[in-house]
């Protein structure tokens, strides 16, 4: 499938954290590769090394809003955040959910644990504790429900996650599961299972530089050729919606403009 089929990339990083290139560089790269929607999604403040918080987060929001205005005719620019799991059912999503168009959630290293669950996950990531995949999935789901998360980013990276539990919960919540081009964590069997359950998957680049924006090939390679289950791209077509949380619209609704949804053919 041609890269031109893909309209959105909702996971990118800039020089506001650990990426290369300014937010404007990222947006321009999205325009060059034919995207119709792009999100700037730096790590939330709980990440010790890369978290964007306080005045810096305010500056990023204002810059993203400026870019959304400047490039409105070429691309829709969303203000997002990649939140970090901080405990069982907890993450570092800001209190003002309305500020953000899209929230991602994942387990990351470099986060101070708030409870014994996350301390064990930190030890697991370091090879010092057994994995508890079902518990990890339930922790992500509980946080997603509490903080209105839109996308589970690279599930299974660093710590094991029970994909069946995650997919069933994601379907119920309306939260998408990311197939990440930078961290291809889902196996063909995982993708087949998610599709069978009926949860929505989407490919994202997790770009940390302009040249990686819209690079969805690894995610699609993981999803399509290696699975026995046919996977198709469905583009939802409708008039542009006002900027607001992706949670406000069902992922199966026609208001989900520009989403690339992976589902059984």
Image (cartoon, helix red, strand yellow):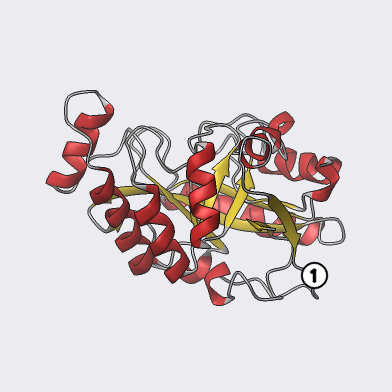
Residue 194's spot in the image, x, y percent?
50, 53
* Residue 28 percent coordinates (x, y): 79, 42
Is residue 228 at all visible to an observer of this figure? yes
Residue depicted at x 48% and y 44%: 190
Q: Position of residue 31 (x, y in %)?
A: 83, 46
Residue reaching furthest to the top: 127
- Quadrant where the image shows the C terminus: bottom right
Q: Nearer the viewer, residue 209 or 185?
A: 185
Query: From the viewer's perspective, is 199 left or right of 240?
Result: left
Horizontal arrangement in the rendering, residue 85 relative to residue 230 (left or right): left
Which residue lies under the disc numbered 1? 237
Q: Does residue 58 show up?
A: no
Using the rendered view, name the quadrant where residue 37 is placed.
bottom right
Badge 1: residue crowd in 10 Å (few <14, some 14–19, many ≥20):
few
Against 136, is 120 above or below? Answer: above
- Name the quadrant containing residue 225: top right
Tell me the residue at 35%/56% (across/down): 165
Label 1: element kind: loop
Number of dots carrying numbers: 1
For residue 112, side relative to residue 55 (left or right): left
Residue in front for this viewpoint, 190 or 26: 190
Location of residue 148 with respect to 152 vertically, above or below: below
Name the spot of residue 208 as percent of width and height, x first: 60, 32
- The residue lying toward the viewer, choosing from 235 and 197, is 197
């Amino acid at each position: 499938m041609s890269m031109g089929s893909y309209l959105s990339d909702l996971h990118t990083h800039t020089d506001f954290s650990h990426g290369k290139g300014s937010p404007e560089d990222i947006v321009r790269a999205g325009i060059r590769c034919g995207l119709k929607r792009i999100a700037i999604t730096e790590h939330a403040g709980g990440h010790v090394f890369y978290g964007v918080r306080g005045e810096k987060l305010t500056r990023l929001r204002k810059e993203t809003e400026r870019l959304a205005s400047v490039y409105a005719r070429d691309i829709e620019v969303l203000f997002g955040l990649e939140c970090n799991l901080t405990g069982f059912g907890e993450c570092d999503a800001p209190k003002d959910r309305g500020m953000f168009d899209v929230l991602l959630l994942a387990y990351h290293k470099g986060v101070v644990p708030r409870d014994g669950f996350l301390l064990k996950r930190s030890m697991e990531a370091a090879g010092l504790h057994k994995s508890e995949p079902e518990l990890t999935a339930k922790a992500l789901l509980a946080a997603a429900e509490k903080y209105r998360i839109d996308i589970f980013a690279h599930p299974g990276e660093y710590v094991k996650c029970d994909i069946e539990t995650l997919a069933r919960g994601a379907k119920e919540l309306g939260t998408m599961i990311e197939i990440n081009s930078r961290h291809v964590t889902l196996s063909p069997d995982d993708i087949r299972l998610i599709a069978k359950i009926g949860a929505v998957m989407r490919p994202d680049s997790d770009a940390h530089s302009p040249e990686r924006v819209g690079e969805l090939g690894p995610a699609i390679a993981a999803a399509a050729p290696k699975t026995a289950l046919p996977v198709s791209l469905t583009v939802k077509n409708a008039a542009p919606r006002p900027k607001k949380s992706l949670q406000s619209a069902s992922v199966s609704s026609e208001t989900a403009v520009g989403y690339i949804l992976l589902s059984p053919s």
